[in-house]
Amino acid sequence: MHYVTVEGITKSYGEKPLFNNISFHIEEGDKIALVALNGTGKSTLLRILCGKETVDEGKVWVHKEVTVVMLEQQNAFDLKKTILANIFAQDHPILNAIREYEHLTDQDGDPDPGLLANAITKMDELGAWHFDAKVKQILGKLNIHHLDQHMGTLSGGQLKRVALAKVLIDIGFEHKHTLLIMDEPTNHLDVSMIEWLESFLNQENVTLLLVTHDRYFLDSVCNEIIELDQQQLFIYKGDYENYLEKKAAREESDKASVEKARNQYRKELEWMRRQPKARTTKAKSRIDAFYDVKEKASVRIERQQLELNVKMTRLGGKILELKKVYKAYGDLTILKGFDYTFKKGERIGVVGKNGVGKSTFLNMLLGLEPADSGKINIGDTVIFGNYNQQGLVIKEDVRIIEFVKNIAEHFPLADGTKVSAAQFLQLFLFPPEKQYTYVSKLSGGEKRRLHLLSILFRNPNFLVLDEPTNDLDLPTLSILEDFLQEYQGCIIIVSHDRYFMDKLVDHLFVFEGGGEVRDFPGNYTQFREWEKEESRSQKQEAAAPAISAGKETPVTEAPKARKLSYKEKRELELLEQEIAKLETEKKTIDEKLSSGSLPYEELEPLTRRVGELIQLLDEKGMRWLELSEMEQ
C-alpha cells in the first residue's frame, strides 16, 4: 500500500534554504532512516510529514487510511498531570478502560472492590487484557513505574522515555495503517532499552521513518537510508555500510563532474571575453549555455577530513590514581573500595544501567564530587576536557566565531604550525558563512557540536566524555571518531552508542550495581557476547541434575592442565582477529608493490610498513602459540 508521496517540496527559513525541490515515496512496510547534518532540516521535514509544518512549494500527500504518529525531541506534556494521565490522554475505549484499571491498581493501599470489579468487567468486555499486558511490557522495559507521579517532577531523560512509551502504546491502538515517525528515539535510553526497542520495532508490523545517530540501531531496524545533503535528497537501499560506500562513490562522481564543468567553464569564459557586443542568435544560445555551465562549476564539494596532529600538553608519569575509593548516596552504593591507576593513552568505556552512578564517577575523577573515603590523586600535568550533558553555557549571546576566539585565536599542531579558529570551525562542519551566526540561532545538535569543539580547542590531554553522541548527527560523529582515533591523550567515555564505543575503547568499567565495578578487557560488543555466554552457562548449570548428597566423590583426581583465565581467553580471541587483519594488510601491500605501477614516493612508506607488519606478525604469532598450548 502506498503511504506517502512527497513531490518537489521546498522549504526555507528567511534566506536560509533547508531543502529544494525534493521528492520521495514511503510504502507500507518501509523502514527508513533520515540522515543529514544538524540544522539542515531533518526535524522540519518530519514535522511537515505529520502536518505540523507547511511547505513553501510542492505537495505532500498522505493516504487517507494512514495515521501518522510522531515522537519529537521536545514533547508538549501537561506537567501538572500524572504520567498515567499523559500516556493515556487519547480518548479510546480500550485506553480508557486500561487507564481506569491501572489507576486503581497503582494506588497505595487496596482499591475499592466495587470500582475494581467494574474496571475488570470493562476490560473483559473490550478484550483489553492483551493490550494491558503490552502496555505493562512497554512501561517495564522503559523503566517507567509509579504512574501516579506528576510529570513536573521527572528529569529530562525520564520525560523522553515517557514520550517514547506513549508513542509505542498509541501505535497499538491506532488504525491498521500507521506511519511511525521518530526523532532520535534512543537518546536517554540505556543499552538494554535500546536493544529491546530494536526487537520491538522489528516485531511490530509498522512503517517507520526515523532520525538516529545510533548506527547499530539504524542497521538493526532500517532497510533504507535517505540523506539530505546540500538541499538535495539522495536515496540508498541497504544498511549503513552500503550507504557509506555508495555515498563515497557519489561524491567521487560529483567531484569529477564539477571538475569537468570547471574546465569547460574556463574555455567558455575565454570565448565570452573575446566576443563583440553585437551577438548572433547562435552566440546567444551559447551564452545561455555558458551560465548553465557556470552554475555547475560553482558547486562546492565539501569533503571534510579531520587530520590534525595535535600538539598536546605532555602527560607526566603520574596521571590519575584511585585508592580504596568509596562513594554512596543514601542506599545507592556507587563505589566500594575502587582501585585503579590510569596509564598513558588509555581509552576506557563506562557502561551500566541508568542510575548506577556513571556520571557521579566522572565528576569524582574531575574533582567536582568528593569521595566518601579513599584517595583520588591527579597528576600535575593533567588538563581535563569535560564534555558533560549540561551542554553549552554562555552568559550572553555571541557569534560562533567570537565564542571560539574568546577561547583562543589558534589551535597548535605538533609540527609547530597552527590552525586558526575559523579553520577549526570548518573542520567541525561550520562553514565560513555559518560562523557569524549567533549561538542562540543554532539547532540543539549544532550547539552540542559547538560545545564539543570548544572543549577540544582548549587542547586537553585527558578527555572525559559523558554521552558525547546525544543529538550529534552522523557526519559530526564520523569527524569526532576520526579526531579521537588520532588523539594521544587519555579518554574515558560514558555512552550508550555501541558503535562509538566499539570503535574507540580498549576496555570497559562495567558498573554492576552495589558498588561493584568490573574491568572488562574488550569493547562493548565483546562484553555483550561474554554476558550472553555467561547467562547461557548459568542456565545450563541450573538445569543440570544436582549431585545427590550421599554420592561419594573420588579421593584422588587426575591432574588437569591449567585452564586459561577469562582475560587470557579474550586475548587469544583478539589475537586471532588481529593476526588476520595484519595478514590481510600485508597481502594488500605485497600486491601493490608487485604491480610495478606505484609512484616512487609511495614505495618507501609501503616497504617500511611491510617490515613493521612482519615484526608484529612474529610477536603476535608467538603469543598466540603460547596461549594455544596452554588451552590444550
Image (cartoon, rainbow, N blue to C red):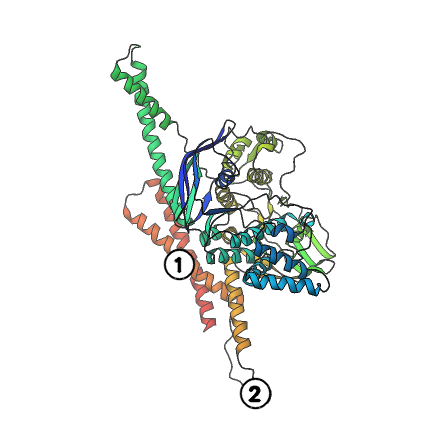
Quarter of the rendering occupied by the C terminus: bottom left
Residue to which mark 2 is pinned = 553
Left or right of 21? Residue 279 is left
Quarter-wise, where is residue 408 in the image? top right
Q: Is residue 272 above or below residue 522?
A: above
Quarter-wise, where is residue 449 in the image? top right
Q: Amino acid at mark 1?
A: Ala
Whether residue 318 is visible here, answered yes or no, is no
Q: Residue at x 41, y 59 (%)?
A: 579
Crowd class of label 1 (few under 14; some 14 to 19; many from 20; radius 10 Å): few
Q: Is residue 601 above or below residue 292?
A: below
What is the distance, in whole Å, between disc 1 and disc 2 at their CAs? 45 Å
Residue to which mark 1 is pinned = 580
Left or right of 254? Residue 340 is right
**x, y percentage for residue 496?**
56, 53
- The kind of secondary structure element at disc 1 is helix
- The kind of secondary structure element at disc 2 is loop
Q: Is residue 351 above or below residue 58?
A: below
Q: Earlier in the sequence, mark 1 or mark 2?
A: 2
Crowd class of label 2 (few under 14; some 14 to 19; many from 20; radius 10 Å): few
**x, y percentage for residue 335?**
68, 59
Whether residue 355 is visible here, answered yes or no, is yes
Left or right of 341? Residue 540 is left
Q: Residue at x 36, y 28 (%)?
A: 296
Q: Nearer the viewer, residue 327 or 22?
A: 22
Q: Is residue 237 above or below residue 569?
A: above
Q: Amino acid at mark 2?
A: Thr
**x, y percentage for residue 574?**
47, 61
Q: Nearer the viewer, mark 1 or mark 2?
A: 2
**x, y percentage for residue 551?**
57, 89
Q: Nearer the viewer, residue 610 or 591?
A: 591
